[in-house]
Structure formats: C-alpha cells, structure tokens
Image (cartoon, helix red, strand yellow):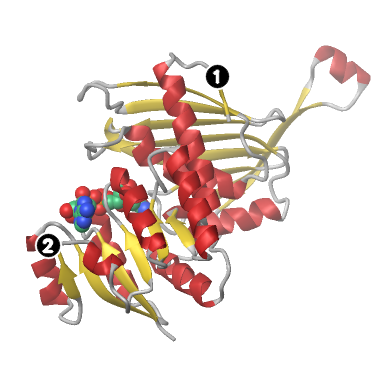
Amino acid sequence: MDINVGLIGCGYWGKNLIRNFMETENCWLSAICDTNKGLLEKFNKRYPSLSTHTDYKAIIDSKEINAVAVVTPVHQHYRLAKEALLADKHVLVEKPLAASVAEAKELVALAEEKNKVLMVDHTFLYTGAIRKMKGLIDAGEIGDILYYDSVRVNLGLFQEDINVIWDLAPHDLSIMDYLLRERPVSVMAVGSAHVKEGIENIGYLILNFDSNLIAHFHFNWLSPVKIRLTLICGSEKMITYDDLVPGESLKVYDRKVEVMDSDEAHDKLLYDYRVGDMWAPKVELMEALRLVCGEFVNSILEQRAPLTDGESGLRIVRILEAAQRSIKNNGVEVKL
Ligand SMILES: NC(=O)c1ccc[n+]([C@@H]2O[C@H](COP(=O)([O-])OP(=O)(O)OC[C@H]3O[C@@H](n4cnc5c(N)ncnc54)[C@H](O)[C@@H]3O)[C@@H](O)[C@H]2O)c1
C-alpha cells in the first residue's frame, strides 16, 4: 500500500520536500496546503495531479491522507503536528520539532499513544558526509572524542519568530547528537540582538559532558562570509567537516599530541607530536532530502521508529530551550 502524503507549508523548504516526495517510492504526495494562493497556483501548474488547499483542515480531515508533513514556521509546528496526530496521521515535522520542551514532549507522548510515526527533519543526518563520519567514529578511527567545535555563520535570512539559535543550531546539535555516544549535561550560552530587538542574531553555546568532552558552537546571521566548519578532535585522529566543499567535505588528520611516556618526560613535560597523513574519505553525494522522505515512508511501512524520531527532536529542543534560558541569564550554566 502506498503512503498518501499531504504537505502543509509550501515556502522555501516546502518546495524542496514537495519535489522529493514526488520522486519517493511507495508514496504518493496527493495534496499540499499554503495560505498563500499564488504559491499554490505555481505548484499546481508544475504538478497538476496535486490537490491544493488554503486551509490545512482539508489535509487533516482527509480520509485518504495517512501521513502529513509540517513545513511551516516553527511556532506552528506543535499545533499542526498535534492536530495531525489526533486525526491518526503519521507526521514529519520540520526542525526544530517544536518551540518548547513541553510542546515537544506532548507530541512524542501523543505519537506513542496513537502508535504513529513522529519524525523530525534533521536533514544533515541523511547527508553522505555525516553518515561517513558516523561510520568512522563508530569504527574507532579517531579514538575517544575530546572536543567538538562547530561554526555556522553567514549573512542569513532573519526569521520573524525565532532567533539564530533556534534557526541554525538544530542542524549542528542534531549532528552532534547523532555522532557522539555521550549526552550533554549542561549548557552555557550567550548571544546578542543587533538588528531586531529580542531576536538574537549571534549566539555562542558551550555544552558540558560528564567526561572531559566539551562542545562549542558559534551561530551568526550577521557575517560577511559563509562558514560551515566542524572540528572533531579524537584521542587518535582529528576530523574536519567543511560543508562548503562538496565531495571533499571530510578530512581525517592523523595528528595527535601526548606527553612522552617516561618519568623524565613527565617531569619535564616533553611532548610527542604525531603529524601524519591527511586523507579525504569518499562521500556519497545524494540529496539528503530524498533519504528523509524515504525514511519517513519506510518507517511507516516497516512500523519502526525513524532515525530522526520524536525523541531525537525532543533532545534538541531541550538543548535549545536551556540555551535560551542561559542567554537570558548572561551565560549561566543550565542543567539539562
Ligand atoms: N531542514 C532544513 O535544512 C531546513 C531549511 C530551511 C527551513 N527549514 C524549516 O522549514 C520550516 C519552514 O521554513 P521556510 O524557510 O520554508 O519558511 P517559509 O516562510 O519560506 O515557508 C513557510 C510557508 O508556510 C506557509 N504557512 C504558514 N502557516 C501556514 C498555515 N497555518 N497553513 C498553511 N500554510 C502555512 C507560509 O505561507 C509559507 O509559504 C521551518 O520550520 C524551518 O525551520 C528547514
């Protein structure tokens, strides 16, 4: 049986999901909804088989549709996802899952009660680079992870309803959540609003762990240059991930530093530097959103949790909310 999908929100990201759902096997995107009629007319010309609606209730109330994608601004995720779950639909929600921990928890509980798939679009986990990195880390290639450092800055699109952390951090936090076995125990964050009062356009986050692993993130919508760079330092090797260099986005450096292993060396703090080869692992260049749509449909058909399930969405929202609280309190440490 094909999964019949309805999609709500046909803006910048919605159009990418529409295109990918159209090409996903075992599913049929039958209806789309947006309050903007002009957008619907454009999609109707391109995909005449789609039924178009300005009221999302047409999708929620449809007897034929059994799965709904919510691709609206963040403040609407909870309400639309909840209504869809209450109407017994499986739901794919854009990142972040919801605008608060309370909302995200309620969605996770409701999906469980209704026995429906609740998936969040943490797109980066479906990229070849992140899947490759996960394989390297799980195989022990870089050893124990010592620190995680990530920068995502550009002259970004200022959002109306959320600050830079709620907009950009779900990407890097979900990548970190996927790659690391350890979960953070507290957050410290600072940020500033320079353009629109109350909406921070720059933010720095530090996540602490029970071990001496530390993670740092820098997000900025007000940067003259675009940087998307992550450094992961392991006890054996180091990895860099530059999302702006397709095909060669990953580099593994055979580099490490340790105090030499002798009593004299320990006394005098003599260091042993290993500066070995660097290699760029082959990364599969398939559009991540195709895999997102496939995972949503397959998890429904196979009656299993998707890779990016509601719980993973909740973990990210928990960090976002704690970071927001820390920013409001001048960087105070907030326990998770
Ligand atoms: N995964 C990613 O990499 C990624 C990238 C960009 C955006 N997003 C997410 O996608 C979502 C949408 O972002 P966007 O940039 O496409 O925003 P957008 O403003 O371009 O599009 C949102 C669309 O939703 C429509 N809409 C709003 N409320 C509606 C309602 N009640 N019923 C029907 N339509 C409604 C708007 O008319 C608009 O066309 C956000 O949650 C954002 O975080 C994810």
Left or right: residue 102 compared with residue 42 = right
Residue 226 in sight: yes
Secondary element type, mark 2: helix
Question: On screen, 262 above or below 86?
Answer: above
What is the x, y in percent for residue 221? 28, 33
What is the x, y in percent for residue 230? 49, 40
Q: Earlier in the sequence, mark 1 or mark 2?
A: 2
Q: Which residue is mark 2?
A: 39
- Residue in the picture at 40% in, 18% down: 328
**Pointer 2 residue Cβ closer than 8 Å to ligand 1:** yes
- Label 1 crowd (10 A; few <14 / some 14-19 / many >=20): many
Left or right: residue 215 compared with residue 156 = right
Q: Which residue is mark 1?
A: 333
Question: On screen, 311 above or below 65?
Answer: above
Amino acid type at image mark 2? Leu
Image quarter of residue 163: top left
